[in-house]
Structures are given as structure tokens and as C-alpha cells.
Image: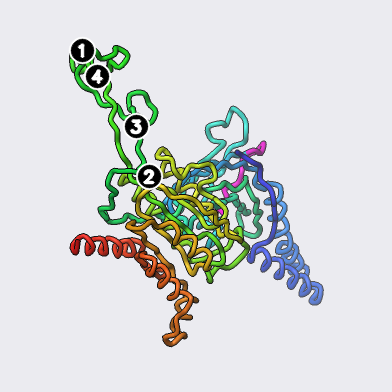
């Protein structure tokens, strides 16, 4: 939504200050030497910057701005195009200006750009009253981030004074975690008890996947698929098909106590280890869903992803899921709730240096014979502790031992390690297991 300019500030440039200082020096010299000509020069040098201040103050920017993103939801590191429509709200023609947008990360603003003079508001100059400026933006981190507001600066023709105004409001951009392509692992669960079974009818538009076959004597007319019949020339009826979908569970530690490098307030704490966990969660969940798994995500802290039961929906799109991940943050206290796990399928845990109660809770999610993988993130502080221990088991190594003793495959990683390489370790282990079977 457009908003008028605000926060107007008028000031002299370095050139204006030099002219003002030169005028003062010339005035003192003229008074001391009794030189009338030098007094004229002093008055001119003093008048020019003051006139420049008056000009830019009277012609200060009176603009409105509207900002849009294409796309509005973007992955961290990917590019979105920002379009800013600036329109003149003053009764007169605006001055040529320089613009830049504020950013929530270094270098904190976009490079300056030129903004042409805009005609006065009104139907007569409607075609030339507004202009659109475009620039590409590649957010470095996930989050719901504000972009803007627009800053516009005008100056006098001699470059002695400027007037700067804040135009419009900041707009929120949804930056989702990067989804890393993962190798095919060949994970599967044989059909049987405990496996999720869905009946789909594609023709009726709900969760049904209808197949068609030729009409047979005794088939109900309500099952006739008229569109398929028209295409084939023969009477066709709908045939339901049962399909089984394996289930996978992802356990993620979202408590601050599990990340030693976390800094800042709880609702905005930054942690390289936690960012690695969120990117891995996004990559694994999207990979498993696209390979046919029904994915359930459980958090150690208060629910931020499954608060409306979306985690078990196959219709929950990747974009909706990733948009929710954009705002996931570290929580203060765990919210561990024991539950029964009737569905068979692989279990993935993604965590840092978790607390003992968190580890115990995660270990209960594996049933005998199931594949269970734990991605354990080592932050720099945890690695330094291991290096200084001189062979004494640290908290991180004890964590690995607990998972390993419980039958889990442990994949230790650093916070700067490639996610695809960590997943490849799982693929390699599964390949060895099949080869030895």
C-alpha cells in the first residue's frame, strides 16, 4: 500500500559547507582590510548555500511508494525481483533524485539508483506521474524479513544541499530455507499392518485416484465415467485402486539448550547449528514427500509446524511447508509428549548437542527393525570441547554412543558441512547393508 514521504531532513553537502566557510573567511577579510569588493564576494559565497537549502526544502520529495516481489516466497540464496512503484503526490513537478532501499542485512541498503523527475499529480499527467524501479535481491538467510522503506534524496543544481525523505513502508518478504537436492536412497517399507493406506479418486477431486475400465454387466450407472467414455467411444466406469504409502518420521530439536552457539533473545536467537538443522529438515522432508512418503514432523519444543495437524497431510504443499519453516525459531523449554507410534517407517532425528531428556525422547521413537538415522550437528564450541578433552568422552561423543547403542545410524556433521554429503553417508550405509544382506 502506498504511503507518503516522511522523515524529511535537509542538510548542506560538503561543497555547501566549504562555500559557507569560504564566505565567512571572505567576510572577515573584507571587514579587516576594508575591501568592499571582497565583501560582495563574501555575500555571494554565503548566499549560495543558503539559497540551495531553501530550494531543496521547498522542493522536498513528496512521493508515495508501493513495493512488490516476484516471487513473494524465495529460498535463501535465490533471487527475487523487487519492483518499487514511486508516484509524485506534490502539485508540482518533482526534482530528479537518487533512491535506495533499506535491507535487514549487510550492506544494509541497495546501491543508489537514479529516479527521474515526475510530473505533478492529476489526470493530465497520469502517464508521467509514476515510475517503476527494479532490482534483484538474493537474501542470504531464511526468515520473514522487512525490505524497505524507500529512501529518496534530492539536491540543488550546484550540489550544495540535499533533502532526504523516507518514502512508504517496509514490505515483508518470506525467505525459506534452502532445499538441497538429495540422492535417491531407495528407502521403502513393505505393505502390511501399520502402513498408511489411502484411497484416492482423482475423478471426484478429493483424495481419490480413480482408474477406468470397460463397462461390465451389473455395474452401477453412477460409476460411469462419461468423459473417459466419450474419449474411448466405449462405456467406461470408475475403478477404485488401493494404494499404500510408507510413513517416515522426522524428529527435530528446536530447544535453545541443544545449540551452544545460540546468541540473542529466544524468539530471535541466531545459531549456525540450528540453521543447518532447519535446512536439513527442509531437504529431507521435501525429498521424502516427493518419493511417496507420508512425512510426520515432531519438534522437541512447542509446536511451530504441526499446530493445526498439517504434518500428516499429503496435500500440504512444499511451498506452504517451507513458508512455515521460514519463521521457525529456537524455543526456551522442551514440550516433550510421549505418544504411541503405530506406523512403520524410517525415523530421522536432526539435532545439536541435545539435553539428556531430549535424547531419551528421541530414542523411544524407533521400533525394533526400523531404520533410524541421527544427524548430529557439531558447532565450533562443541568441536573445541572435543579437541580439548584429550580422549575423555565429551557430551557430543556420549550422545553418539547413546544413539549407536540403541541401533541408530549416527551421522556427525559440522555446521558448515554440505547437506547432500551428510545424506550421502546414509545412502552409502544403506547400500552396504543391502550388499551384506
Q: Can you give x and y, in whole percent of width and height, for residue 401 in the image?
A: 40, 73
Label 2 or label 3, whichever comes before in sequence order: 3
Question: Which labelled disc corresponds to residue 199?
Answer: 3
Label 1 or label 2, whichever comes before in sequence order: 1
Residue 189 appears in view: yes
* Mark 3 residue element: strand
Q: Nearer the viewer, mark 4 or mark 2?
A: 2
Towards the viewer: 353 or 96? 353
Picture residue at 53% right of the left edge, 70% below the top: 261
Picture residue at 67% right of the left edge, 36% below the top: 91
Q: Is there CB contact under 8 Å for labels 3 and 4?
A: no
Q: Can you give x and y, in whole percent of width and height, for residue 404 in the image?
A: 37, 69
Disc 3 from disc 4: Cα separation: 20 Å
Q: Return the residue at label 1.
A: 217
- Is residue 98 in the magenta section? yes
Q: Can you give x and y, in whole percent of width and height, for residue 312 in the image?
A: 44, 43
Residue 415 appears in view: no
Disc 1 from disc 3: Cα separation: 25 Å
- Is residue 153 in the magenta section? no
Question: Which labelled disc corresponds to residue 228?
Answer: 4
Disc 2 from disc 3: Cα separation: 14 Å
Crowd around label 3: few <14 · some 14–19 · many ≥20 (10 Å): some
Crowd around label 1: few <14 · some 14–19 · many ≥20 (10 Å): few
* Mark 4 residue element: helix
Q: Return the residue at label 2.
A: 294
Q: Nearer the viewer, mark 4 or mark 1?
A: 1
Magenta-tinted stretch: 89-102
Disc 4 from disc 1: Cα separation: 18 Å
* Mark 2 residue element: strand
Picture residue at 45% right of the left edge, 48% below the top: 322
Amino acid at each position: 500500500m502506498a504511503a507518503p514521504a516522511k522523515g524529511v531532513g535537509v542538510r548542506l553537502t560538503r561543497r555547501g559547507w566549504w562555500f559557507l566557510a569560504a564566505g565567512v573567511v571572505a567576510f572577515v577579510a573584507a571587514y579587516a582590510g576594508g575591501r568592499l569588493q571582497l565583501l560582495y564576494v563574501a555575500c555571494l559565497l554565503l548566499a549560495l548555500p543558503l539559497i540551495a537549502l531553501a530550494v531543496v526544502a521547498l522542493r522536498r520529495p513528496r512521493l508515495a511508494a508501493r513495493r512488490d516481489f516476484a516471487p513473494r516466497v524465495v529460498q535463501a540464496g535465490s533471487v527475487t525481483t523487487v519492483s518499487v512503484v514511486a508516484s509524485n503526490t506534490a502539485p508540482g513537478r518533482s526534482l530528479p533524485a537518487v533512491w535506495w532501499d533499506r535491507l535487514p542485512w549487510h550492506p544494509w541498503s541497495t546501491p543508489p539508483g537514479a529516479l527521474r523527475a515526475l510530473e505533478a499529480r492529476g489526470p493530465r499527467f497520469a502517464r508521467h506521474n509514476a515510475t517503476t524501479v527494479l532490482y534483484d535481491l538474493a537474501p542470504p538467510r531464511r526468515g520473514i524479513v522487512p525490505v524497505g522503506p524507500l529512501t529518496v534524496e534530492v539536491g540543488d543544481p550546484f550540489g550544495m544541499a540535499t533533502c532526504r525523505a523516507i518514502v512508504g513502508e517496509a514490505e515483508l518478504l518470506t525467505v525459506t530455507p534452502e532445499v538441497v537436492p538429495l540422492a535417491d536412497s531407495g528407502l521403502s517399507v513393505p505393505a502390511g499392518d501399520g502402513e498408511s493406506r489411502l484411497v484416492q479418486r482423482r475423478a471426484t477431486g478429493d483424495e481419490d485416484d480413480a482408474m477406468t475400465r470397460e463397462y461390465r454387466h451389473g455395474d452401477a450407472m453412477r460409476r460411469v465415467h462419461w468423459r473417459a467414455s466419450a474419449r474411448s467411444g466405449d462405456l467406461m466406469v470408475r475403478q477404485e485402486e488401493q494404494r499404500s504409502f510408507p510413513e517416515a518420521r522426522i524428529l527435530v530439536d528446536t530447544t535453545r539448550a541443544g545449540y551452544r552457539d545460540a546468541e540473542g533473545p529466544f524468539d530471535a536467537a541466531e545459531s549456525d547449528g540450528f540453521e543447518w538443522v532447519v535446512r536439513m529438515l527442509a531437504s529431507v522432508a521435501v525429498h521424502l514427500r516427493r518419493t511417496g512418503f507420508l512425512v510426520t514432523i515432531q519438534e522437541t519444543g512447542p509446536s511451530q509446524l504441526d499446530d493445526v495437524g498439517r504434518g500428516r497431510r499429503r496435500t500440504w504443499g512444499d511451498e506452504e511447508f517451507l513458508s512455515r519453516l521460514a519463521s521457525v525459531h529456537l524455543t526456551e523449554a522442551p514440550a516433550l509428549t510421549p505418544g504411541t507410534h503405530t506406523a512403520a517407517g524410517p525415523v530421522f532425528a536432526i539435532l545439536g548437542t541435545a539435553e539428556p531428556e531430549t535424547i531419551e525422547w528421541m530414542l523411544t521413537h524407533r521400533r525394533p527393525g526400523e531404520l533410524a538415522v541421527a544427524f548430529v550437528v557439531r558447532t565450533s564450541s562443541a568441536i573445541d570441547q572435543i579437541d580439548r578433552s584429550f580422549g575423555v568422552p565429551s557430551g557430543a561423543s556420549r550422545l553418539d554412543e547413546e544413539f549407536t547403542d540403541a541401533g541408530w545410524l549416527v551421522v556427525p556433521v559440522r555446521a558448515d558441512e554440505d547437506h547432500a554429503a551428510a545424506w550421502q553417508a546414509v545412502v552409502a550405509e544403506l547400500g552396504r547393508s543391502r550388499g551384506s544382506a
